[in-house]
Amino acid sequence: MDLNPRVPEIGDDELDVSPAEPLDETDRALLAGLARVTGRMDPMPADLIERSLFAATLAGLEAEVMEVVQLPGALAGVRSSASAAAEDAPAEARTISFTHGDLTLMIQLSRERAGQVRVDGWIAVPTPSYTVELHRPGTEPTRTDADEDGRFSFPAVPHGPASLIVRRPAADGGPVSTPVIEL
């Protein structure tokens, strides 16, 4: 890998150029070499554009953002057994809590078969009229209603970035969103 682009020699009399001048062949050669080096040493993540559009879409929903209260590590052994482990069944779960004003949201993420994640959630106040949306890059939101105890679930979600939006009536404070988390 040649990291030294071939740049024409620059004389001392050429060093007093203004950045306002148009690009010349020396500038183009230098920029092309820099692009090759950065492309090899620190390439752009393949999904950067999709993640950026996802973040912009969430920002455009005009929902207040919840604060992460707790983000502990995985709880080993949850929903597993010796026979289930042999069948490549779920082997861990993690719980994340979010808060915004008087609203508290807790979710448990459990690994499912075939690389899927189960999201079980609970809104701390019984909220039969609240709708919960699961937003993921490149897909339409998935919606479900919280039951009379504030519980909801999304049974089979692919791994990757996601955000939950709790749709509350305007009288209850309007919609709130979790930060983007990795499922």
Image: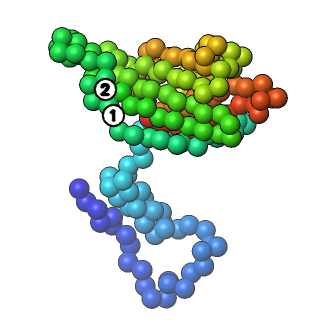
Q: Dot 1, how many residues are within 10 Å of its Cα: few (below 14), some (14-19), or many (20+)? A: some
Residue 30 visible (yes or no): yes
Q: Residue at x 60, y 74 (%)?
A: 19
Determine the secondary structure under disc 2: strand
x and y, in percent, of residue 127 in the image: 68, 20
Residue on which disc 2 sits: 92
- CA distance for labels 1 and 2: 6 Å
x and y, in percent, of residue 34 in the image: 40, 62
Specify whether 2 is left or right of 150: left
Q: Residue at x 53, y 68 (%)?
A: 24
x and y, in percent, of residue 137 in the image: 53, 29
Q: Quadrant of residue 55?
A: top right
The answer to the question of whether label 1 and label 2 lie on touching residues, with beta carbons closer than 8 A, is: yes
Q: Residue at x 50, y 83 (%)?
A: 14
The count of marks equals: 2
137 or 119, which lies in front? 119
79 or 35, which lies in front? 79
Determine the secondary structure under disc 1: loop
x and y, in percent, of residue 44 in the image: 42, 47
Q: Amino acid at mark 2?
A: Glu
Q: Earlier in the sequence, mark 1 or mark 2?
A: 1
What number is the disc on residue 74?
A: 1
Q: Quadrant of the C terminus?
A: top left
Q: Dot 2, how many residues are within 10 Å of its Cα: few (below 14), some (14-19), or many (20+)? A: some
Q: Quadrant of residue 52?
A: top right
- Which residue of the protein is positioned furthest toward the right in this rendering? 171
Q: Quadrant of the N terminus?
A: bottom left
Q: Quadrant of residue 182?
A: top left
